[in-house]
């Protein structure tokens, strides 16, 4: 039975009208409601994502063992390849943004495109990453869930046509909610989003991101319970001040391990990109390499939390720890480089656990009375390697604290993380996340990206700009300048090669000297400064500004004498208009 509005008490009717009016007129009210909604959906998404990973793990490994039992233990070699055969086409044909580890794409969306992410990314990323991880791909959950939560936030912001600053904030709220729900780490989720996604710390961002994080964590705990990611960890006790130098040394070594991981990851990506083979089949070949490694070290498959706990508890020898740490670098590089989908956070923790535990065993053997058990170094190594890879010390400290709930480890953890981050920044300006964006030709600094770094010269240059011959008399040149209204021309010889540039000021200077019989070749600027079509407009603007000129020739990179067009100040203004998203009015929501 439907209850009419007239059956509802007048007091409640009035409150409902007030709420509807606030929703219609107050952007703040609408934003708060959407932030909570993003938290709810992110929390549910994290739960579904974890269930999906568990389900696919059972299908691939339990089902695979039954179907491929005739291969004996060697059946595991084929499992990641089978997953790759599904993941490749799924990403290639439905949402190519779902390829890789996800966080760089979100960072770029927030910094450069007003937070706009296609709605379909959430569904494709959920399915592709759960298949990849469930079939043994050596990746983590955090990258996918960040992209999934962010896609939800972006879609809601676009759906309700909020201003760009609100869309970016909702994207950050989705990222925080995803991290919080996945790792049961609400504080770390907040600072992950502030430190890596928004890259701005202020009270407003903290309040809204925190609200989403709390909501998502509450939802996830209702389904998954309230327990830390690592339940069996060694008790830490500060043995002596002699441990301080060793934790500092561990931080330095962790930075070099992280640096090597970043280089290996992108070298592997370049290797697969250069391979002339259907892109949607490449993950299967990366899967075969992972399967071969997993045949001997099964802990390399998937997220690897059980292997980390075993290492921290002293279940592996030094040789196995070092071997698995190095192989994890290769396994993760092959998974992501070949086109798989998953995060780099868990692999970084795995490498750190192996490194720290091996380091702890070594120093404990040398100094048994002065050094604590190796497990403490394993925990610290986890945070140090991730902090160095991501250049995110605050997130590293908080997420390790929340994943272990061991406050006693906080002092050595902070020490090693600070040292590893400092060393990593000296080794490379770019983190594992910003490196991917930098390789796209875009540099993310604090705040937003310069819009002119998003547009290439070829997209805005004037292609059919008039040219003059070196043999043209300057009197005729002056007539051409007056007729066209231009202040200069490229000079092109009879063979069609760029000879130089000539401007109105060159003509005026010649006429002041009484050189009326000169030709263009006598006054033209030879070897002018040029730009290439694949450079950004930002790079071209730096050259134009330094020379104080109004135009600059665009030439072929392989043949600098071949003129392709001219980039004018007017073109740069047009490029800026093209690059900057509309602030007050977003386009219709993306399907």
Image (cartoon, rainbow, N blue to C red):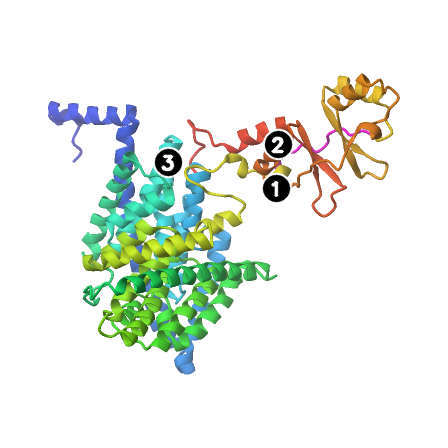
Q: Secondary structure at mark 1?
A: loop
Q: Secondary structure at mark 3?
A: helix
Q: How many marks?
A: 3
For the stretch drawn in magenta, what is the main secondary structure? Answer: loop
Q: Quadrant of residue 223?
A: bottom left
25 vs 405, nearest the viewer: 405
Say which residue label 2 marks. 546
Say which residue label 1 marks. 535
Q: Mark 2, residues whose alpha carbon is within 10 Å: few (<14), some, or many (≥20)?
A: few
State the mark number for residue 505. none
Marks 1 and 3, how far apart in space? 30 Å
Marks 2 and 3, how far apart in space? 37 Å
Say which residue label 3 marks. 167
Q: Nearer the viewer, mark 2 or mark 3?
A: 2
Locate residue 83, reporting x and y percent.
43, 65
Q: Is residue 460 magenta?
A: yes
Q: Mark 3, residues whose alpha carbon is within 10 Å: few (<14), some, or many (≥20)?
A: many
- Residue 492's place in the image compared with 386, above or below, is above
Sequence-wise first label, 1 or 2: 1
Sequence-wise first label, 1 or 3: 3
Q: Nearer the viewer, mark 1 or mark 2?
A: 2
Locate residue 105, reporting x and y percent.
44, 47
């Amino acid at each position: 039975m439907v209850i009419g509005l007239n059956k509802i008490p007048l007091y409640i009717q009035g409150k409902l009208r007030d709420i509807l009016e606030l929703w219609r007129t107050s952007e703040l009210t609408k934003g708060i409601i959407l932030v909570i909604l993003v938290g709810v959906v992110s929390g549910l998404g994290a739960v579904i994502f974890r269930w999906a990973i568990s389900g696919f793990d059972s299908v691939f490994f339990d089902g695979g063992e039954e179907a491929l039992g005739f291969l004996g233990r060697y059946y595991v070699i084929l499992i990641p390849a089978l997953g790759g055969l599904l993941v490749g086409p799924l990403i290639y044909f439905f949402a190519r943004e779902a390829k890789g580890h996800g966080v760089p794409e979100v960072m770029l969306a927030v910094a450069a495109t007003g937070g706009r992410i296609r709605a379909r990314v959430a569904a494709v990323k959920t399915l592709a990453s759960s298949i990849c991880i469930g079939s043994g791909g050596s990746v983590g959950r955090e990258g996918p869930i960040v992209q999934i939560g962010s896609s939800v936030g972006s879609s809601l912001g676009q759906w309700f046509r909020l201003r760009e600053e609100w869309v970016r904030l909702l994207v950050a709220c989705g990222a925080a909610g995803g991290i919080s729900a996945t790792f049961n780490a609400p504080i770390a989720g907040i600072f992950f989003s502030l430190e890596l996604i928004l890259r701005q710390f202020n009270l407003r961002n903290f309040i809204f991101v925190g609200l989403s994080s709390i909501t998502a964590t509450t939802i996830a705990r209702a389904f998954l319970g309230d327990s830390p990611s690592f339940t069996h960890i060694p008790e830490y006790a500060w043995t002596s001040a002699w441990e301080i130098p060793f934790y500092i040394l561990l931080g330095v070594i962790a930075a070099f391990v992280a640096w090597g991981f970043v280089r290996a990851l992108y070298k592997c990506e370049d290797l697969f990109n250069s391979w002339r083979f259907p892109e949607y089949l490449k993950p299967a070949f990366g899967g075969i390499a992972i399967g071969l490694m997993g045949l001997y070290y099964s802990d390399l498959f998937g997220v690897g939390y059980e292997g980390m706990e075993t290492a921290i508890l002293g279940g592996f020898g030094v040789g196995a720890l070092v071997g698995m740490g190095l192989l994890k670098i290769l396994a993760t590089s092959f998974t992501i480089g070949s086109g798989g989908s998953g995060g780099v956070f868990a692999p970084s923790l795995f490498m750190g656990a192996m490194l720290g535990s091996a380091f702890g065993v070594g120093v404990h053997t040398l100094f048994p009375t002065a050094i604590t058990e190796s497990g403490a170094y394993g925990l610290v190594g986890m945070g140090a390697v991730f902090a160095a890879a991501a250049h995110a010390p605050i997130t590293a400290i908080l997420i390790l604290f929340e994943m272990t709930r061991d406050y006693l480890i906080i002092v050595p953890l902070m020490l090693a993380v600070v040292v590893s981050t400092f060393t990593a920044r000296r080794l490379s300006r770019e983190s594992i996340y910003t490196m991917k964006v930098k390789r796209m030709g875009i540099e993310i600094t604090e705040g937003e990206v310069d819009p002119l770094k998003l547009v290439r010269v070829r997209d805005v240059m004037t292609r059919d700009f008039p040219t003059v011959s070196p043999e043209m008399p300057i009197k005729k040149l002056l007539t051409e300048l007056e007729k066209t209204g231009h202040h200069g021309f490229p000079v092109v010889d009879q063979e069609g090669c760029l000879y130089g540039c000539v401007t109105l000021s060159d003509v005026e200077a010649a006429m002041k000297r009484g050189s009326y019989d000169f030709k263009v070749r006598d006054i033209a600027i030879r070897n002018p400064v040029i730009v290439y079509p694949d450079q950004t407009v930002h790079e071209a603007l730096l050259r134009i500004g330094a020379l104080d000129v109004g135009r600059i020739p665009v030439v072929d990179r392989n043949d600098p004498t071949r003129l392709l067009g001219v980039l004018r100040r007017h073109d740069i203004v047009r490029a800026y208009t093209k690059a900057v998203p509309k602030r007050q009015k977003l386009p219709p929501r993306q399907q």
